[in-house]
Image: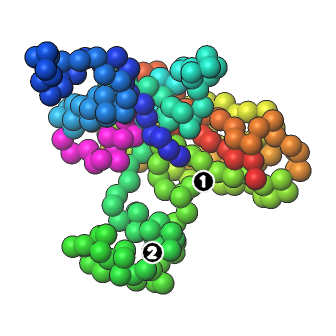
Amino acid sequence: MKPDIVGPGVDILGAVPRSARGQSFASLSGTSMAAPHLSGVAALIKSAHPTWSPAAIKSAIMTTADASLTDETGTPASYFAMGAGLVDAAKAIDPGLVYDTSPEEYIPYLCGLGYTDEQVNRIIYPAPAVHCAEMENTEAKDLNAPSIMVALTVDGPAVTVSRTVTNVGAARSVYRVDVSAPDGVSITVVPGELQFDEVNQKASFVVTMERAAPGSALESEILGAQLAWVSEEHVVRSPISIISA
């Protein structure tokens, strides 16, 4: 699901090439203003957690974001407008759990996209060469990302995805699931509770999504839901985008 996140980007005071008037700063808006904010937050997290991977840093940024945003019409913003929400640097430093992904996990995904062995090996070089025919492809929904995007067909089966989280908070902690589903959609998570006894311990869970009534119509072609793991100190939220196919 894209975008991943949004950052401050409206009326930002930024340095500009010196103008005829001798001005070195101006109030600017746009992606070019938001991107430096997000890059700075990523650098801040990396300085606090030097061993974290890029995927873990992205997860921390996304799962702690503020999703209570409105769009230009004043209505609640969709995930396709705001991603996981507005970045919150203070919370991102201490996310509690992260969805980590190694570079190797993307190789079966690249193969599933139809890239040839030569193309995949160019991307992963200097890692050892791979042969796509020798591995099981990974669908986009099954990447261990902090967001979920699935399609539910009218008479199709339920869609199941799995995720693995890594505990980066208190060694002994318990998280309970909190799911918000749109009308007409059933979302179940197993297990409903994750217990950790040490830092960097991993735990996996399965999310199953289906139409509440087979063949029933949904209120929109694209629906938003969310899954959150809640402890005494953290709320680790993942956006879920559901396409009615």
- The disc labelled 2 sits on which kind of residue? Tyr
Corner quadrant of residue 219:
top right
Q: Amino acid at mark 1?
A: Val
Q: Nearer the viewer, residue 28 or 6?
A: 28
Residue located beneath label 2 in the image: 115
Q: Residue at x 42, y 21 (%)?
A: 233
The magenta stretch spans residue 52: yes
Residue placed most toward the observer, 10 or 209? 10
Prevailing secondary structure class for the magenta stretch in the rendered image: helix
Residue 119 position in % (x across, y down): 36, 76
Observer-side mark, 1 or 2, equals 2
Residue 110 in the image: x percent, y percent? Answer: 44, 68
Residue 229: tell me if it is visible: no
Circle number at residue 3: none
Query: In the image, which residues are magenta?
Result: 49-61
Q: CA distance from mark 1 to mark 2?
A: 23 Å
Left or right for 57, reference 107: left
